[in-house]
Image (tube, helix red, strand yellow):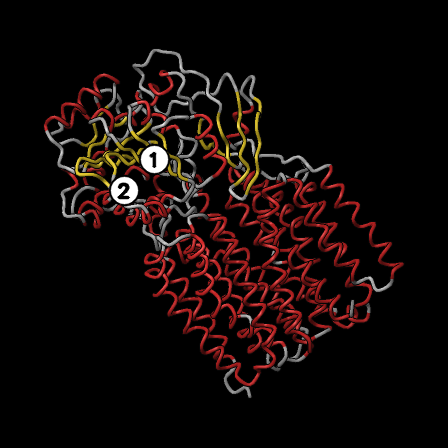
Amino acid sequence: MSGDMRLNTAIGLVSAAVVAFQICLMQILSIVQWHHYAAMVIALALLGFGASGTCITLMQERLLRGYAYLLPAFLLSCGAGMAFCVGIAMTPLVRFDAMLVLARPESSWRLTLTCLVFFTPFFLGAMAIGLAFVRHVRAIGKLYCSNLVGSGLGSLLAVALTWGFLPERIPGLIAILPILAGIIMCGTPRRAAAACLALVPAAWAVLYPPGLAMSEFKALSRALEMPGSTIVSTRNSPYGLMQIVSSPSLRFAPGVSLERQALLPATPTVFKNGDWFGPVPRLDARARADILDSTTTGLPYALGEPHRVLVLDAGTGADAAQAISHGAEVWAVEQNPFAVDIMRDNLESSRLRVLNTGSRTFLMRYPARFDLIVIPMIDAFGGTGGLHALSENYLLTTEAFCQMWNRLSPRGLLSVSCWMDYPPRASLKLLATLAEVLERSGVDPRSHIVAVRSWGTLTIAAQRKPITPGDVERTGRFCDALGFDPVLLPGLEPSRREGFHALQDASWFDDVDAVLSPKRQDMPYGFDIRPATDDRPYFSQFLTRKSLARLNSLYGIRAIPFFEISYLVLIATALQITALAFVLIVLPLMKIGRSGKTRTLLYFGGIGVGYMLIEMVLIQRFVLYLGNLVYAATAVIGAMLIFSGAGSYVSLRLRSVSRSILAVIPCLVLAGAFALPPLLHGTISLPLAARVGIMLLFIAPPAFLMGMPFAQGISTIGEDQVPWAWGVNGCLSVVSTPLATIIAVELGFAWVMIFAACAYGVTFLSTAGRH
């Protein structure tokens, strides 16, 4: 193997390992903590790329003198770090707990220590890549191509590994890649043979993986504390770590009527990444179906007997079992294959049809109409502390509710339930969304919506036809029999709203009435209860910057994080990363000369910000199109990096038209911001293979062009600025990751694309006067 081929192979291997390890850590940290902390730790760890630029800038001459020894050393130590860092992070000395960090800020040093542990392998891998870039500037096009293509293949590798291995074993497998890269670059057979010893820690991490120490506040941790609890089944996949827990103490009866006297049977329960996912349903005992009929979710069946029922995001099938018990023909839509298997194994019925696809994909592809459409229970008992504030939920947007409304038969019902939270947020946002959708359809929400509540849950039924006196009577009998209170019903006396369950703060009823009025837009409220949209699909994001002062006066500053943990952590992460990135960029400025500093900063910073903003928003856009977040992320990241790698490969041959390329990129991005939504909606009914082809055709041209500016820029700057340019690009790429989410939450996805175009516009302007 020639020297150039060995180097390009090594760069491709370590790049694949870095991206695969990033994705692996995100799943592991989602299991032991929650997904937003996973993103925060990964973002901080990826600052290793910025730190590598600083380190190489400050010690460039010494590093280059020892290049032959240091490059394989960085690669081998990167692999060892990947093999051991998860185990180190799980030790009692290092391990942090997200909830304890919020309750006891003095323990936040554990979070910092965890970040430093995960920082290490990223830093070592980035040192190897950056050092190769500096040493072989003239071959930067091919090297950057290897870097990007390797990264793209790494994303595919990470997904593939989750199908066959448990999360704790995957880091050891990924660690083999940089170790192989180090062996390849050792130069002599003797050194290569000695380097093979570095495979030992990787093999050890695979054969004897570290235990994952889960937060004591995770639902699975609490379930396993119950007497007799045991995990009876475990299965990993790109959809998450799915585990079934059996216990004589586990019961499933959300907000069950206090009038019910029968013993609740024990139910095996499924957990996804340590969070509650759903019960394992059964049809062999009528009593199990009766449990849900004794909750507010029995409301639509009290109003009538639907013949055809659609259950969206069906989970493990509890709502489908309830519908089957009423003799309905049931369509259950669920994209998690493990959950689909559970339904098929436990709900054997000729009246059940299970579809393994996304709910929105189903709504847009299948024209069938239904007498009842059921949306699963929203939130959790006691609330989730804002843990899902940054989770995109395309099933709870106005566009989704419009599609569901249009899929109802003339006598159809749309049923959605949620846990009662305090301060009230989810219930009011649901009502606001339904009210807006019904008004768009030309009907008065107050004459089409029925709502009842128990001690802990609220069920809302939006009826296609106006509510009749018979519906009012049936709702009254349902409430009286089970001790529920009607919340919305034509002609309802205010005193009946608290007949069985009084609220400590009865102002919620006034808010409910205000939400259904035409002037809901002017309704003053401490939280954001505006309906979510496909452009801003964050249903559980309720916090607004303007409301912080009012919330502080009502609940105290220490209480606010427990309303919106995710969003506050995101903002804190963005501030921390920005501060660290500033330090990592400014420090080398003191070392290098003045000539071209600002231009280099603007050029490579614009590339880093623009590229990551586009990547982040395309992932979210294609979730709806492909019907699956995992596949959308893998396809977008893989396609962008591979096409960008191809662009980098040919970039140096087009040096004379580099400014033209930089002018075209923002134009393509802006065009895509407005053309993509109608394109996706117009073609979503096509088969999956055709949709993937359309996605690749959309991504390929801009991604190909976006792979060119970095290599072209590196070839035009002085060698002393190459590591700094590498660090600037890495730092601002990481900064833009939380920035993309903040922009999406506050303004929507379209604005993320607009900001990305502006970032590339800055890169274009930085080349003014350059020949």
In the rendered image, the vertical position of residue 299 relative to residue 167, given as above or below: above
Where is residue 608, by image quadrant?
bottom right
Q: How far across and how far down the image is residue 519, in percent?
A: 17, 48
Q: Earlier in the sequence, mark 2 or mark 1?
A: 1
Residue type at mark 1? Trp
Instruction: Identify residue for label 2.
Output: 368
**Residue positioned 39% across, 28% down in the render:** 318
Residue type at mark 2? Ala
In the rendered image, the vertical position of residue 700 relative to residue 13, given as above or below: below
**Horizontal side, residue 334 vs residue 523: left or right:** right
Q: How far across and how far down the image is residue 410, in percent?
A: 17, 38
Q: Nearer the viewer, residue 709 or 676?
A: 676
Instruction: Identify residue for label 1.
Output: 331
Q: Nearer the viewer, residue 413 or 573?
A: 413
In the rendered image, the vertical position of residue 301 relative to residue 441, given as above or below: above
Where is residue 139, by image quadrant?
bottom right
Q: Nearer the viewer, residue 91 or 504?
A: 91
Residue furthest right as drawn? 190
* Dot 1: element: strand
**Residue positioned 62% across, 46% down in the render:** 161
**Residue positioned 57% across, 26% down in the render:** 231
* On-image quarter of the N terminus: bottom right
Visible residue check, residue 557: no
Q: CA gap, disc 2 to disc 1?
A: 10 Å
